[in-house]
Image (cartoon, helix red, strand yellow):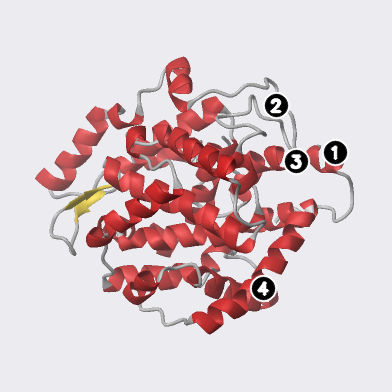
Amino acid sequence: MPRLPLIGSRARLAERYEPHADYGFFGPDSVTWKVWGHPTSYILGFARSVTIEHFDPNLAAAVVQSGGVKYRPHTRYGRTMRYFGMVAFGATEPTAKAADVLVKVHSKAIGHDPVTGGEYDANRPSSQLWIHMTAWHSILLCYETFGPGRLSAEEETQFWAECARAAELQTIDPATVPRSREEVRAYFEEWRPHLAASEAAQDMIDFILGLKVALPPDLPALQSLAFTPVTALMRRAIISTYPRYMRQMAGLSQGPIVDALVRPPTKLLHQVLASNLHLRLALMHLLAPQAVDVAAPAILGMPPLNPITMTPREAQARYGFEVPDHAHPDLRAKQRRRVFDDGVAPSDEGLVESQQHIGPLAPRETASA
């Protein structure tokens, strides 16, 4: 892990990072920067979203059958953090490119779902919307629960409008994205009949909730041991945000007393992190080094080379990328033929290309956006 000085000014910290080409899709006046930039997103919000995702049996099948979370957990964690960081804070061109490549990556995440008996396809708009909503909802819920508290009505309206804007980077129809707290609740309620918790899904949720996925695999044993009380606290804090029916599906028995006990120390820990830039960046270097160069300029308030924002649709048109739902039809069709007609594994071409834009597959390499 690169060492950060524990003393020094914001300007000295900023010298370590390159400014972005522009403000991306949101900018410093956005609620996205306010919420996604808070330390509650690093572990709590992120881990909540990627565990709840597994209640979609199609997504669980894609994750379990790919095996990536189990055999390269830290790089899978870091790559996902980097991509989410790019969407929230990154410059428009590299983020639009990363989103385009992600369609290729997801083209290989297809197959037969052993739980439903149907097919799964990670590029399916409904599956992408589930991933999108679990992420944005979880990040906001943990910000409200363990961070500064509830947004104002105006901020919340802006947050969900920005959530819909970010959906333009995925194979989602933005018109289907909920735009208010009430619509978000209705969305999750409508999804309940589609949710399931197979033994494999429960195993993945338990594996991720251990939070070792966030720690470097080469972390010295004593340092890893020192993190044990913190990860145990974070696990219980995350579970405290699950609704009762999700706890039952996941086989988690944590009750309201534990929920109440874990919240004050979790809030205090994140208050400390929020008040100290050096600790925040040091933690990010440890947990997700691939995401640091994306998020740090925004967290440090560094002006970009060109202080503009644009929408994803504007960026896709400017840089020559297709709208994601229509992107790479030949590759997606080829992958389907390989899997469903020929009965062989999909190719890795998108996955290999993604290393340039989302981060390396092998641990301890430096990503380049």
Question: Which is nearer the N-term, disc 4 or disc 2?
Answer: 4
Question: Which is nearer the N-term, disc 4 or disc 3?
Answer: 4
Across and down, in percent, residue 240 comes to 51, 72
Q: Secondary structure at mark 4?
A: helix
Q: Pointers 3 and 2 in contact (CB under 8 A)? A: no
Classify 10 Å Cα crowding around label 1: few (below 14), some (14-19), many (20 and above): few
Across and down, in percent, residue 362 comes to 50, 52
Across and down, in percent, residue 166 comes to 46, 36
Task: Report the Cα–Cα distance between label 1 and label 4.
Answer: 33 Å
Task: Report the Cα–Cα distance between label 4 and label 3.
Answer: 27 Å
Q: Residue at x 68, y 38 (%)?
A: 298
- The amino acid at mark 2 is Pro
Q: Secondary structure at mark 3?
A: loop
- The amino acid at mark 3 is Leu
Task: Report the Cα–Cα distance between label 3 and label 1.
Answer: 8 Å
Residue for badge 3: 300
Q: Residue furthest front?
A: 153
Q: Is residue 320 above or below residue 250?
A: above
Q: Residue furthest left?
A: 341
Q: Secondary structure at mark 2?
A: loop
Does 228 sit left or right of 317 as displayed? right
Q: Nearer the viewer, residue 24 or 224?
A: 24
Q: Residue at x 52, y 68 (%)?
A: 238
Q: Which mark is residue 11?
A: 1
Task: Report the Cα–Cα distance between label 3 and label 2.
Answer: 11 Å
Quarter of the view holding residue 297: top right
Q: Quadrant of the C terminus?
A: top right
